[in-house]
Amino acid sequence: MRKFICLVLLLLPLSSFAKTCVDSGNVYDDLSCADQALDSSKKELNVIYQKIYTSTQYKDEFEQSQKAWLNYRERQCNGYIAAEASQSQGAGSGLITKDCLVTITKQRVDYLKTLLEK
């Protein structure tokens, strides 16, 4: 259980001082915005996860499901997508990888929201 709590804490954003993102056309600004979007998605994911976790009688199964999903997300975005993105120049590959993490995390948030509705 301690490992899981540490895992959840790792998902919490390191900074809560996010600025508003605008389309600047600068890849480094875009990367900063992607970081902010990822932090926001992780925060939302943690809130929803905690709501479901506290209300379910299947805590172990839900915890294992979340761990499997985290493993999938990391492998997907830091594996195949990162390899494909490596063809980009400069910080572009990092932006592609971050965008993948944001997209998959938002998909998980949307899915977990459907579980809350049941």
Image (spheres, rainbow, N blue to C red):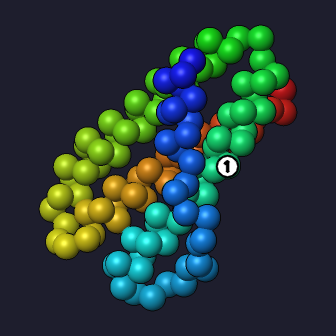
The C terminus lies in which quarter of the figure?
Answer: top right
Residue at 77% x, 11% y is: 57
Residue at 72% x, 24% y is: 53
Residue farthest toward the front in the current orientation of the protein = 2
Residue farthest toward the bottom in the current orientation of the protein = 24
Q: Quadrant of residue 117?
A: top right
| Drawn side of residue 94 relative to residue 98, left or right | left
Q: How far from the left and from the top, in percent, is residue 26?
A: 36, 85
Looking at the image, is 118 positioned above or below residue 10?
Answer: above
| Drawn side of residue 81 relative to residue 44, left or right | left
Q: How far from the left and from the top, in percent, is residue 63?
A: 59, 20
Judging by the rendered image, the residue that carries numbered circle 1 is 44
Q: How far from the left and from the top, in percent, is residue 56?
A: 78, 17
Looking at the image, is 107 positioned above or below residue 15?
Answer: above
Report if residue 89 is visible in the image: yes
* Amino acid type, callout 1: Glu
Between 69 and 54, the one lying in front of the other is 54
Report if residue 65 is visible in the image: no
Between 1 and 71, the one lying in front of the other is 1
* Label 1 Cα crowd, 10 Å radius (few <14 / some 14-19 / many 20+): some
